[in-house]
Structure formats: structure tokens, C-alpha cells
Amino acid sequence: MGKSRISTMDKADFMFDYPSNDYENYTNYNQTSEDSIHHVEDVCSEDILCIFLLVMNVVIIVLGLVGNGVVIWIAGFKMKKTVNTTWYLSLAISDFIFCATLPLNTFYQATFDWIFGQVMCKFTSFVMFLNMFSSIFLLVIISVDRCIAVMFPVWAQNQRTIKKASVIVILAWVFSVSLSVPSLIFRDIQHHLDKTRCHNNYKSHDTHSSILICRSIFGFLMPFLIIIVCYSIIMFKLRSNQMAKSSKPFKIMTALIGTFFLCWLPYHTFMLAELTKGFPNEILAFGLTIGTSIASANSFLNPILYVFMGNDFRRKFKNSILSKIENAIGEEGRTTSRYLSRSSSMDARASTHI
């Protein structure tokens, strides 16, 4: 195995999942020369792309912790607890936890030496996939909630309660945890010379392929199919009722879903490309390196969307950041309530005429 290939493969190893031939090259890695190891050690200081990704990770960490921390403070302590704040609070907590563990992976990316032990090696990977699954499941829940509110406004007004929302969020987290367990099982560390490597130690190609397909289906493809169906129903209903203006509050959710899709699409694309075995290892490693960094960026973008997607955009810079986020989060709840009240009134008039 040449030096360039080792360097390229290790760049992809710093955070998420790796090319499926990683376990096949595991023995070869043990047999590499000391010169190759030292070449890997110094590569980030000589690689512009690696330095750029390091800077990008630092930005994600700072903005993610601050932004999601503010959202947690507002939605959890400053605002009246509602169904909508329950959704967004859980989403912010998921992103905050991921950003809190990202410094460890960033250090590994810079040094190619995992010094945090086996437990943290497993835990950081587990948190990444927990963030992926919980985020997309929460977006699905919010989309279904909006769809029900539009299709059955009277029923939704009577049945949408904070207690039920909390139960649904807990179930989403339990499902997310169960799908993230493979990271706790197969993530491992390996020592060689003065380096420690945090990697996926799959026992067979079938095991890796099964996990990869499961993550892509439940963490990306199926959720977006549900979201697309929900949004198609919502837009059809709003247009048929000639209430197009009521779709305005849905732009925050549309932005959140669109951002998640764009951020995670490259990662899932290159992960599924492994199954075809038609791409060189260098291309897969490069694609996963870029894809994982773009996926990480999703964790700090949500608070920014809360700020800049509110109705009072022209007056945003005259208000405090806390007020902006609070208005953005609360806007959908207020508008949904108005829509439910308006629909209930229309149903009441219709019943009177009948």
C-alpha cells in the first residue's frame, strides 16, 4: 500500500464511517512502515484541504454550541412550553450534544492520533449517528404534525397536547439510540508504533453493507419520502382552501428540511457508492471527507434559520438575537393556532347551514 493511499484513507477515518475495504486493509495497515506513519502524522500541516476542514470544524463547534445553547435556553426556559417548542427544543439538544463531542474528532483529524480511549472512540461515533437519526425523525414528526393540523384542524386543536408531544419525542430518541448502537459494537481502537487509530472494525463485508443500507434507508430515504408526502398534502390543502398566505409559517420547516437534505446528501451518496465497488478508494475517501464536514455543518445552521426566517425580517437587526429566535420558534405555533381557530369557525358555520 502506497503512502498516498494511506494518507487518503486516514483522512476519511477521522470521524464517521469509512470505505468498506477498511477492514480488508486492516492487516496491511499493521504492516506499514514507520515512514508511512510519520507521513500520515504530518500530512494535515501540509494539506490545504485538511487545514480548511479543521477551520470549518472549529467554526461549527463555536457557532453550534452558542447557537443551540441559546435555542435551548429560550425554548426550554424563556418561552411558554408548547407542542412546537417541544419539537425545536429536542432538535437543538440533539445538535448541541453533537457539537460538544466534535472537538475530540477535530483533534483526531489534526493529529491522526486518538488519545481519548476506546470508550470515547465508540461514544463519539454513537453521538454522530444519534444526531443524524434524531434530527431527521424530529423533522418527520414536525412534518406529520403540520399535515394533521391542516387536514384535521378541529381534531388537532383538541388532541395536540404537550404530554403527547413529549411521549412522541421520547420514542423518537429511543428509536434513534437503537439504530446508533452498531457504533458502540464495531467501533474500536488499534495501536501501531506511536499512533492510536479510532476506526470501524467490521467482521465481514456483509455486516458493513447491512449497517450502511439500514442507515441510508431509515436515516435518509424513508424519512424524506414521508416528508415529501406530508408537504404535498399541506400545499394542496392550502391552495384548495385559497389560504396560500397561511403557508408562510411553513417556510422555517421547509428551510430546516432543505438544509438537512443538502447537508447529508453528499455523505449518503458516497456511502451508497461503496456498494457499487465502481469507485477508486481515493475518490470515496475524498468524498466522505468532504461529505462528513458538510453534514456536521447542519448542526449549527438550524439556530441561524430560526433567526433569519421570521416574518419581521426587516426589523430583525433592530431586535436582540434572543427575541429573534423566540419569535421564529413561536411564530409557527401562533399561526397554526390561528389556522386551527379559523378552520374551526368555518366548520361551525358549515354545520349551522347544514
Image (spheres, rainbow, N blue to C red):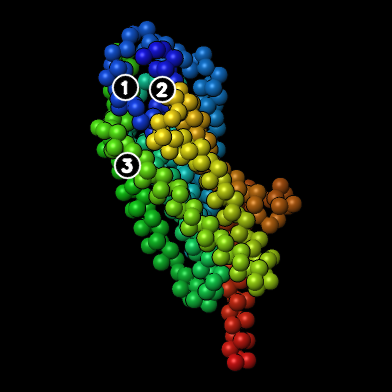
Q: Earlier in the sequence, mark 2 or mark 3?
A: 2
Q: Amino acid at mark 1?
A: Asn
The label on residue 210 is 3
Reading the image, the residue beneath label 2 is: 9
Q: Return the residue found at the far right.
A: 314
Compared to 337, does 321 lie above or below? above
Question: Residue 85: percent from the left, percent from the top?
Answer: 51, 59
Q: CA distance from mark 3 to mark 1?
A: 19 Å
Q: Earlier in the sequence, mark 1 or mark 2?
A: 2
Question: Residue 280: percent from the left, percent from the top?
Answer: 44, 24
Q: CA distance from mark 1 to mark 2?
A: 10 Å
Element under disc 3: helix
Q: Dots 1 and 2: beta carbons under 8 Å?
A: yes
Q: Dots 2 and 3: beta carbons under 8 Å?
A: no
Q: Amino acid at mark 3?
A: Ser
Q: Amino acid at mark 2?
A: Met
Element under disc 1: loop
Q: Is residue 82 visible?
A: no
Question: Residue 350: percent from the left, percent from the top?
Answer: 61, 86
Nearest the viewer among 353 and 112 is 353
Quadrant occupied by the N terminus: top left
Mark 3 Cα shell of 10 Å, populated few (<14), some (14-19), many (≥20):
few
Nearest the viewer among 33 and 55 is 33
The label on residue 25 is 1
Between circles 1 and 2, the one closer to the viewer is 1
Left/right placement of residue 192 relative to residue 161 reads: left
Which residue is depicted at the point 57% across and 48% down? 258
Left/right placement of residue 144 relative to residue 308 reads: left
Compared to 100, does 14 lie above or below? above
